[in-house]
Image (spheres, rainbow, N blue to C red):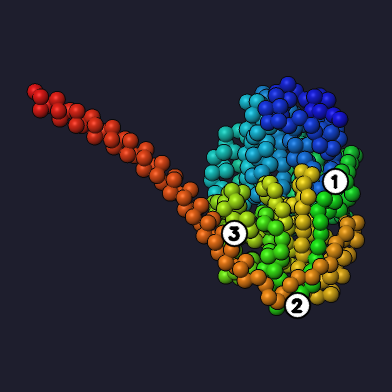
Amino acid sequence: MKTFNDLSLSAKMLDTLAERNFNTPTEIQVQAIPLLKQNKDLIGLSQTGTGKTFAFLIPLIEKIEPDNNNLQALILCPTRELCLQITKEAKMLAQNFKHIRVVAVYGGADINGQIFALKRKANIIVGTPGRVLDHIRRHTIKLLNINTVVLDEADEMLNMGFRKDIETILAKTPESRQTVCFSATMNDEIMGLIKTHMKEPEQIKIGKTNTALSNIEQTYFVVPKDKKKKALHSLLCEIPEGKTLIFCNTKKMVGGVQSYLEKMGYQVSVLHGDMPQSLRTKIMREYKDNISNLLITTDVSARGIDVNNIAYVINYDLPANLEYYIHRIGRTGRAGKKGCAYTILNSEEQAEKLKEICKKTQSTITLKRLQLNNIDELKVAKNLQKTSKNKTQLQKSRFNNKTKSFKNKNVKYNRSTKVSNQNKKMKYKK
């Protein structure tokens, strides 16, 4: 078994990895890092959770020239969540490389703050295509000295309609650049992008192309359309307690499911693309901290959620296509752990469509039945107790923070009062 010491990495990088207890590289890191260190263009086909982010970040960081203050590397990704996750990992890996500055640029955030950060000479930018293009037009990002471009989760960027933006950005970078493309799936649109913008790329595949992770147990249910919410409640009653992600196709449906589950006594959080970034960050923090174990979301969260131990993914709505299905269920069963994915359907036609998806992914999906009558109403009472407990936990956390702040103020007050009293005594003695 290879270690990071076998990959010809610098002493600084090896020290960083050792400090964080990263000792054994994943399969994609073993294959990709040597090729990227040779400055070759690369297509990496791999599923979520295989370690691809480190696979491109490690050689990219080592490639940054210390005496060059220009922007040298650009990483494009589909969502702000993934942008922030990659930025966090890049800063961690670059902690012993004092010359490296990483800046994230993405929509939904104050552009003036990003402009200020960019003026401090970033040499690595992680961004979403639309916001990067906005900065290019404002001349706050200049690509003349770029030597590496990474397209992370290229299939999702194309699904979201970013192809024109990506091609505009690539056209403004030097032809001599190294281009790296990572994707979970391969289709004709990606092949067109590769043929146009990459030079004799090497290709590596981890696992089967277009397949879901093998350690995810997949199940589906067929219920009448007007019974879907009841079916969801029944499913949540049946599965053991654990961190759960529920996907809906629209923001309106997210709201409907949220209202129903809250009436049933569940403590839930919601996440969708129209929320301000500050609120999204707060919700994700509370989800990670187990204040709520149920998160209802649209596909904006199918990428880049950096949350460990998601036990269950529930497709309340059938995803629009194969890629969305793969990336939704890929939120569970990560890092070698087992996961469960459930899909609630309302017609035999949808069942046939789902079976076709599983045929393409060469995976097995099992039909099961849910109890829609006589659902244990005691579960509602238990959930109400959990909701109350979680709210109390959140209130305690906020109270403790306020108490700490009050205590700090009180200490200052006591000290000043003490000094004042001492001065008064001295005057009295005189």
Seen in the image, is 217 located left or right of residue 267?
right
| Residue 57 sits above or below residue 353 on the image | above
| Residue 119 sits above or below residue 195 on the image | above
Residue at 65%, 25% in the rendered image: 96
User: Image quadrant for the C terminus?
Assistant: top left
Which three-letter amino acid code belongs to the residue tagged 2?
A: Pro
Residue holding disc 3: 269
Where disc 1 sits, the SS reads strand
Camera-side residue of 374 and 229:
374
Q: Position of residue 402 (x, y in %)?
A: 41, 46
Q: Position of residue 248 (x, y in %)?
A: 69, 65
Q: Earlier in the sequence, mark 1 or mark 3?
A: 1
Camera-side residue of 132 and 409:
409
Query: Badge 2: few (under 14), some or many (20 or more) residues near its Cα, within 10 Å?
Result: few
- Image quarter for residue 247? bottom right
Seen in the image, is 9 located left or right of residue 188?
left
Query: Badge 3: few (under 14), some or many (20 or more) residues near its Cα, within 10 Å?
Result: some
Where disc 2 sits, the SS reads loop
Residue holding disc 1: 45
